[in-house]
Structure formats: structure tokens, C-alpha cells
Image (cartoon, grey):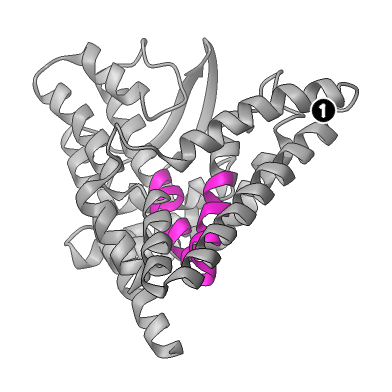
Amino acid sequence: MTLAAAYFLDLFFGDPENWPHPVRWIGILIEKSEIFLRRMFSSNEYVSGTLLTIFICGITFLLTAFVVFYAYLIQPALGFLINVLLIYTTLSVKSLKDSARDVLKNLESGDLVSARQSVGKIVGRDTDPMSEGEVVRATVETVAENTVDGIISPLFYAMIGGAPFAMLFKAASTLDSMVGYKNERYRKFGWASAKFDDGLNFIPARFCALLIPVAAWVIGMKGKDSLRIAFRDGSKHPSPNSGIAEAAFAGALGVQLGGINYRNGVAVEYPLLGDVSVLNKEDIARSVKLSLAVSFLWMGLLTAIIMLLL
């Protein structure tokens, strides 16, 4: 009941722009803590970065547990509501769908500049030099990756430990997105955050090797190819988790992902995932449809597990 309520709240309402969001507070805390810890442990960035990961994830978990626990003490209905609302803030079903469709809308109107700006809001790579095909590829890759980060993983941890575990995961994910880069500034400092995020996503990402092919088969996409390419190409990606989802999406859509991305003007080559095929803008809508199908399938599976355990 709790997971379903949180899931459908996010599916229908997403993240209203003017509402306070815990991720914004976590982001501010990360920025302030980074400055302090770099000063305190300037001689060892591995130590300062590890302490940042422990502090941010620990304080997020403890505060969430405190709020939920005392809400239940005051009134069980209040505790349920707070638990649902906090889990809801960790999900990205609607925001992922809307962001991808914004890119598609701009491409369909022939406005490549606006399409680049739209995709720039959801990817961490240079967008100015992108062709239409590269905009499409970036969007599809982001939909695939964030199906894990924004849907599969938070629901998995919410099932295990409610809002405290879901918020712990969200804190780790936010840390990775802010400091988990392999550049000069964060290679050492962000190492612990990146590794912890990888560890938390490890099991949920492996579920995707089966979830995505099954969902693809249900909605009439290439389920067998999705499974084949997930196992053939998933381990090629430098990320131990993103590669599985991207490879499974590539197989299901019948496209090829990966290639050269630019970050701060530097070309970074990623392995090719999937069989040779030309991407077109319709693949964005198809990737969103597949992501939604995966989320429905996962929600149904988790609900069945919870009912069996009760």
C-alpha cells in the first residue's frame, strides 16, 4: 500500500517546481560539508570524501527515521502519510518522462538549439556540439540509466526499509551526481561517493537484466534481443550498473547506444551497446514507453512480494 501510494503520487504529480524537495536540502548540505571537510582534511582527499559520504548518508537516514518514527507515535495515519510522501520524493517516474518528452517536442518542431538545452538539463555532458542523433542518443541513454536510479532502486530500498532506506539511497545518488566525477577535482574526493552509489545500485541493476526484456516483450518490443544484448554488452560499460540498463534498452528498441561524449570539451569514448542501427527521434517516445512499462512491472512485482510476506 505504501509503495503503491508513493509510486502513483509520483506518476501523476511528479516534482512540483515550487514545492520544497529533500534533494535540494541534501544538495545544499553536500556543498557546505564539502567546503568544511576539504579544509579540515586538506592533506588526504580520500579521507575527506569518505567522511562526506558517511556524514551525508548517515544524517539523511537518521533524520528520516526520526521523523517517520515519531509521526507513527503521534498517529499511525500520520506516520503512514509521512512515509508515503518521503518515498514519493525519491522517485522520478513523471519527471523522467516529462524531461524526455520536452526534448522530443523540441526536435519535432525542428528546434535543435532548444532540444540541446532540454537534454542539457538531464545529462552531464556537453550539449552544444550535439547533432540531432546525438541528442536522441543522450536522451535514450538517460532514460535507461535513470530507470534504475530514479525508479527501480528507490522502490527496492523503500520495500526493504521504508522512507529511511529510500532516502539513504537518494542521498547516495545525489552525492554521486555532485562529487562522483573522475576529473581532477573529484577523482579522489568523490571516490567513496561513487563506489557507494555503485554498490547500492548493484542488485537493482541486475534485476533490470530481466525486467527490461520482459517489459519489452509485453509491450511488443524486442524482448529476446533485449535479454541477449543485456548479457552480451552490459559489462562493456565503465559503470557496473548503467551498462546493463542501457544495453537492455538498446536491444529492446533495436538501436545502438554508446559512442563519443564530450565533457568540458574533452572527448570521452564509451563502448557501443547493441547492434548497428540509426537512432531517430521516435526512439525517445519508445524509450519512455519502455521505462513506464518497466516501472509498472517492478511495482507489480514488489507488491506481490509484500503481499506474500504479510
Near-viewer residue (79 or 283) = 79
Q: Quadrant of residue 302?
A: bottom left
Q: Amino acid at mark 1?
A: Glu
Image quarter in which the N terminus is found: bottom left
Q: Residue at x 50, y 57 (%)?
A: 166
Name the residue at the left extreme: 109
Label 1 belongs to which residue? 45
Majority secondary structure in the magenta region: helix
Residue 150, compared with residue 223, is above or below; it is above
Structural crowding at the residue carrying mark 1, measured as other residues with C-alpha within 10 Å and reported as few (<14), some (14–19) or many (≥20): some
Image position of 153 (left or right of 110): right
Near-viewer residue (178 or 40) = 40
Image quarter in which the C terminus is found: bottom left
Residue 158, compared with residue 301, is above or below; it is above
Image position of 219 (left or right of 197): left
Q: Residue at x 58, y 43 (%)?
A: 239
Residue 296 percent across, percent down from the top left: 27, 64
Residue range highlighted in magenta: 145-171
Residue 103, compared with residue 60, is above or below; it is above
Residue 155: say if magenta.
yes
Residue 28 percent across, percent down from the top left: 56, 29
Name the residue at the right extreme: 43
Image position of 63 (left or right of 45): left
Q: Is residue 258 visible?
A: yes
Residue 253: say if magenta.
no
Image position of 198 (left or right of 222): right
Q: Residue at x 30, y 32 (%)?
A: 18
